[in-house]
Image: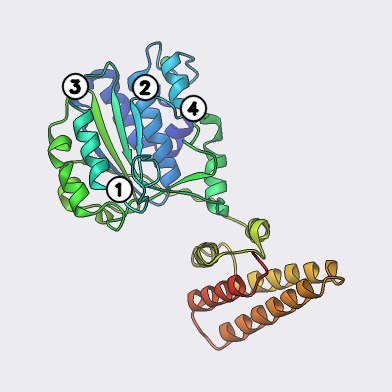
Amino acid sequence: MINKILKNRFPFVSKYFEMLLDNDIDKFPQAIVFEGLDVIGQYMFSMELARILNCNKNKEEDCDCINCNWIREAKHPAVNMVTPINYKDDASKTVISINQAKKITSGLSETSDYHRFFIFADARIKQKSTMETALIKEYKDLNFNFPEEDWVPIPLSTKIFKAEASNSLLKSIEEPPKKTTFIFLSKNREDIISTIVSRSNVFKLPNLKTKISLSDIIKNLLKSYPTYNTREAMEAAGEIEGAIKNDDIDIYDFLNGFQELALSLLRNNLKDMALTKMYENHIRLIQRAKQRISVSMSSKVVLESLFLDIAVNNLAP
Ligand SMILES: [Zn+2]
């Protein structure tokens, strides 16, 4: 029933839900919090539960009924992504708004033939990080699409799912109509307001032990270098810092690789004065970063200031 890729990744949680789906469908939880670092896996698992509960054929992983296909395309009317950017009526797009929460509550008073899912997360339209690309590859054969091109789910935080919006949903979460499930995707249950957590079944999903390589990181960096904006700069710094902390790469290896990259781009653009100057400047900034690391400055501080300086010192329009 549950796709074998997910069963292999999340054996215990899969077993638990298969038991419920086989025997005790009435006990299917009305609210679920997933926690862990693999938010893409949490998305896939949520979609798989939604698929099985809405399937009108055999529930198998290769089922081709209209509901299964609709969910794979992320277009099923009963399966809703609740994120700041997937709510078209609201211009703010930085938080899950109270209006958004109220609309869910009022929608619940209408009857539905389907098992409704509301999957709460943060999300961005952005270039995928090396880790995100590795995770998406892991789940590729499930054939679950994201709602939009370049859309990536991000774990919830109390900054984007604030107390007021959370609290306005409490009653619906506690006593939803039949066949309604709320799912919250998070790094840690502490990133969700406790009144929601206490009304939910919490499942910790294991992290994926994919080692990411220096060459993958440099390759990914190359996609938008040198035209970073400041937000991309901070994301790139965070990604590299994460890979260093995870012992995937060494910071000197990274800085040396980055410097070689800038040097080869410099050599290929010697006829363009402005580009030549820019790459020379970047090579100097990377050199300065190496010196800072050698006097024991924290890699986080060094990487952030390096990438921010590059974002300021590039020729992006
Ligand atoms: Zn089906």
Q: Quadrant of residue 233?
A: bottom right
Picture layout, residue 95 above or below residue 179: below
Q: Do residues under tags 3 and 1 come within 8 Å of each other at their CB atoms?
A: no
Measured in 3D between alpha carbons, the distance from the residue under mark 3 to the one under mark 1, in whole angstroms, is 29 Å
Inspect the image, locate mark 2, and give the three-letter code of the amino acid beneath it. Ile
Residue bearing the label numbered 1: 96
Residue in front for this viewpoint, 226 or 155: 226
User: What's the residue at 55%, 89% (across, down)?
Assistant: 295
Q: Secondary structure at mark 2?
A: helix
Q: Do residues under tags 3 and 2 come within 8 Å of each other at their CB atoms?
A: no
Residue bearing the label numbered 2: 52
- Residue 4 position in % (x across, y down): 47, 28
Inspect the image, locate mark 4, and give the three-letter code of the amino acid beneath it. Glu
Residue bearing the label numbered 4: 73
Mark before the other along the chain sequence, 3 or 1: 3
Residue in front for this viewpoint, 183 or 100: 100
User: What is the crowding at mark 3: few (fewer than 14 residues within 10 Å), some, or many (at least 20)?
Assistant: few
Inspect the image, locate mark 1, and give the three-letter code of the amino acid beneath it. Ile
Q: Secondary structure at mark 1?
A: loop
Measured in 3D between alpha carbons, the distance from the residue under mark 4 to the one under mark 3, in whole angstroms, is 27 Å
Ligand 1 quadrant in view: top left
Rendered-image quadrant of the C terminus: bottom right
On whether ligand 1 comes within 8 Å of the CB at mark 2, the answer is no
Residue bearing the label numbered 3: 26
Inspect the image, locate mark 3, and give the three-letter code of the amino acid beneath it. Asp
Q: Do residues under tags 4 and 3 come within 8 Å of each other at their CB atoms?
A: no
Q: Secondary structure at mark 4?
A: loop
